Image: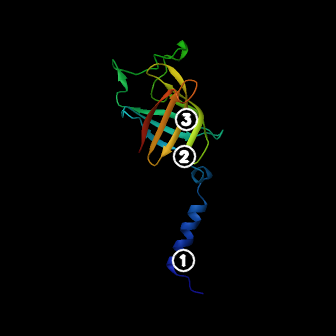
Amino acid sequence: MKTSFRTILSLCMLLVYLCRPESLLAQDRIEGNWTDAKQEAKINIYKSTDNKFYGKITWLKEPMRNGKPKLDEHNPDKELKNRPIIGLLILKGFEKDADNGYDEGTIYDPKNGKTYSCEMTLKNNTLNIRGYIGISLIGRTTVWTRTN
């Protein structure tokens, strides 16, 4: 029986695809790196072991103040005021509620030290982030853009 190179290559590609780690196969479209609306920060969104989505600040346009890394100085908890902004977890506990919707989470704003209820909607390479207090009708929306 004669096997062509194309058949062998196709089988190898299938094998590589099937042997990928499960975490790569299950990756959600929201996961990855995003830039905020003002392009001052990059946030990495990931799915945790609890099947909820979280986001950390991974880059700042201006990471330093007076020669030192910027800190979470506006946090109302005195014990948290000395943690660096880079690495700060700002999105917490989001659940996927539809193809493009994520809710039940919170967003923390290090510029004022406040945490808001939040919902997110994915639209192609943009992410609408709506932070609010109480009901989502009374809130503010910002748009993040996918980045590398």
Q: Are marks 3 and 1 in contact (CB under 8 Å)?
A: no
Name the residue tied to disc 1. 7
Mark in the foreground, 3 or 1: 3
Quarter in which the N terminus is drawn: bottom right
Instruction: Identify which residue, 59 or 138, lies in the foreground.
Output: 138
Q: Earlier in the sequence, mark 3 or mark 1?
A: 1
User: From this viewpoint, is residue 43 visible?
Assistant: yes
Q: Are marks 2 and 3 in contact (CB under 8 Å)?
A: no
Look at label 2 and name its amino acid. Answer: Asn
Look at label 3 and name its amino acid. Answer: Glu
Q: Are marks 2 and 1 in contact (CB under 8 Å)?
A: no
Element type at mark 2:
loop
Quarter in which the C terminus is drawn: top left
Q: Residue at x 36, y 23 (%)?
A: 64
User: From this viewpoint, is residue 89 visible?
Assistant: no
Q: Which mark is residue 100?
A: 2
